[in-house]
Amino acid sequence: MISEKTLEEHTRINAKVLVLNQNYQPLNLCNAKRAIVLLNLGKADLIEKGFGAIRTPSFSFPVPSVIRLMALIKKPLKLQKLSRREVFSRDKYSCIYCGKETEQLTLDHIFPRSRGGANSWENVASACMPCNHRKAGRTPKEAGMKLMKEVGAPKLNPYSLFTNKAIDENWYKFMPWLAKH
């Protein structure tokens, strides 16, 4: 049986830590254990302390909340993977043909796959069910429909790692693009 104190220590060691690049740009998230290793190796500075401490028989380490790397890391931007969620997000959960905002969206291939249309950012869009049924296996021109906007790959976002993540109170000052709730 795990004691309450052991469980609390386990929670602290796995606490999320914001990792900043040398230039203070948010780079990644890691757990407190990894952050303490980086701090002890001299590869990072402690910027913000979290709650509590992690104790060993001979040392006590404050739980880090934010650390900054000593060396500048060049992280290449990655194109987001094509997925339903990403397409709907790119199209702001609205139909590409009528502009209706709805949660009842389908994916539509602008140039139909049955005719060799690619499964790519430039050929996939959000469509409401009535518009998708009306267009069917035709091109928008053949169906007498127009796209409300051009479609393509979403803009590269160096901070996409932090979307849909719980944000610690201490991190907001390093993430100015986020509105504090």
Image (spheres, rainbow, N blue to C red):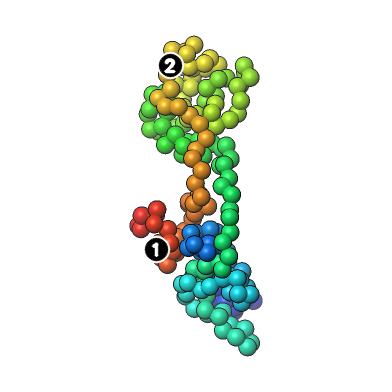
Marks 2, 1: nearer the viewer:
1
Number of callouts = 2
Q: Is residue 16 shown to the viewer in this render?
A: no
Number of residues whose C-alpha sits closer than 10 Å to that of mark 1, classed few (under 14), some (14–19) or many (20 or more): few
Q: At 57% across and 37% down in the image, what residue appears?
A: 82
Number of residues whose C-alpha sits closer than 10 Å to that of mark 2, classed few (under 14), some (14–19) or many (20 or more): some
Residue 180 is left or right of residue 118, and the answer is left
- Counting from the top left corner in percent of width and height, residue 118 is at 61, 25
- Counting from the top left corner in percent of width and height, residue 32 is at 57, 70
Q: At 56% across and 67% down in the image, what residue appears?
A: 69
72 or 133, which is in the foreground?
Answer: 72
Of all residues, the one furthest to the bottom in this rendering is 58
The quadrant in which residue 11 appears is bottom right
Amino acid type of the residue that numbered disc 1 sits on in the rendered structure: Lys
Residue labelled with disc 2: 145
Q: At 48% across and 22% down in the image, what residue appears?
A: 132
Amino acid type of the residue that numbered disc 2 sits on in the rendered structure: Met
Label 2 vs label 1: CA separation? 46 Å
Q: Is residue 120 shown to the viewer in this render?
A: yes
Determine whether the residue tagged by mark 1 lies in a helix, strand or loop.
Answer: helix
Vertical side of 129 occupied by 38: above or below: below
- Counting from the top left corner in percent of width and height, residue 172 is at 40, 62
The quadrant of the image that shows the N terminus is: bottom right
Vertical side of 37 occupied by 163: above or below: above
Residue 103 is left or right of residue 2, and the answer is left
The quadrant in which residue 33 appears is bottom right
Determine whether the residue tagged by mark 2 lies in a helix, strand or loop.
Answer: loop
Q: At 51% across and 73% down in the image, what residue appears?
A: 46
169 or 21, which is in the foreground?
Answer: 21
The quadrant of the image that shows the C terminus is: bottom left
Residue labelled with disc 1: 173
